[in-house]
Image (cartoon, helix red, strand yellow):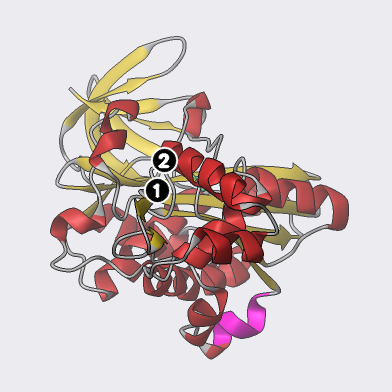
Amino acid sequence: MNSTQQLLIKCLADGCFHSGEELGREAGVSRAAVWKHLQQLDALGIDVTRQKGRGYVVVGGLSLLDADRMQSLLTAEAAALLSALDILLQTESTNQYLLDQVASSGAHAQVCFAERQTRGRGRRGRHWVSPFAANIYMSMSWRFTQGVAALEGLSLAIGVAVCDALQAMGFEHLQLKWPNDILLGGRKLAGILIELAGDVSGECYVVVGLGLNVNMPNSMAMQIDQPWTDLASISTGLPDRNRIAAMLLNGLIPLLSRYEQDGFGRYRGAWESRNAYQGQRVNLITPATTVSGVMLGVSGSGGLRLQVDGLEQVYLGGEVSLRIA
Ligand code: BTN
């Protein structure tokens, strides 16, 4: 999406008719160029209608993420700790955006949301499907001082905080799948990807990425390689992404600010109470082997506790995936 298209989207987001002339004036291009750019938006899933004599419209408008509205919904604690909130119409990956900021200026307590990711990434090298203005794609950067050992279990704790925030907004029956998938009705609703930069034994930066399906267009279903769901499927109206975003920040920012003191211990019980596979036989698939066992829960550092051939074994994260046997 180029900068002209970004300007055109912002004009059309209000759901009103805009003439080609007016749009051209706003974007500093000719009417013919407006038409060309708007045609290309179709490929992004933005449905622009043209009506003779009236101009262009996105019927129903676009409900875009809005920094002012998000900020107005933050708690005093979250607002005080947050150092920057960037909302992008499009980026490769919000995690990459913040990793770049970390590398150039040591970004602490920065948050980035994007309306669309062109190369959204998931765990284990997967692609995260990120269509325009449909879901939440967010990342947060945080500086820690005690090395990565103090961060054990962080991604699981984030999963707990995301479930708590969504539950407080009325989204019930959320479950967690080790290590950090959020499930609804056995299908994936959200995923977390944590990336690290800096000194693993001292000052390091963590970028926490969250992809939450809010209103995934059906046209995208073919691109998703696992059973998925979204919040719209259990909502009466269209979920308010700005409110969801703010509630997530209200939960995640205090968690990150306290994690070096609290550790995973504070979240372990809550994680287990949402464990999708508690007591069930599962297969743990690693690049080298598959282990079959009964899910006992998680250890004090967030490891997976499995009963294998009558003995308890603990498995840490990495390139692993868990399946119901
Ligand atoms: C998973 O595979 O479960 C993790 C998915 C994480 C996706 C989010 S979307 C926002 C952030 N930016 C990315 O490129 N990935 C994460």
Q: Quadrant of the N terminus?
A: top right
Secondary structure found at label 2 = helix
Residue 156 showing in the rendered view: yes
Horizontal placement of 220 versus 276: left or right? right
Residue 225 showing in the rendered view: no
Residue marked by disc 1? 46
Picture residue at 58% right of the left edge, 52% below the top: 31
Q: Is residue 313 magenta?
A: no
Secondary structure found at label 1 = loop
Determine the CA span between mark 1 and mark 2.
5 Å
**Residue 75 appears at what percent x and percent y?**
50, 86
Q: 116 and 307: which one is in front?
A: 116
Magenta span: 77-82
Q: Is mark 2 within 8 Å of ligand 1?
A: no
Q: Which numbered dot is residue 42? A: 2
Q: Is mark 1 within 8 Å of ligand 1?
A: no
Q: 35 and 72: which one is in front?
A: 35
Horizontal placement of 54 versus 252: left or right? left
Residue 235: name its quadrant. bottom left
Neighbor class of circle 2 (other Cα within 10 Å; few <14, some 14-19, many 20+) is few
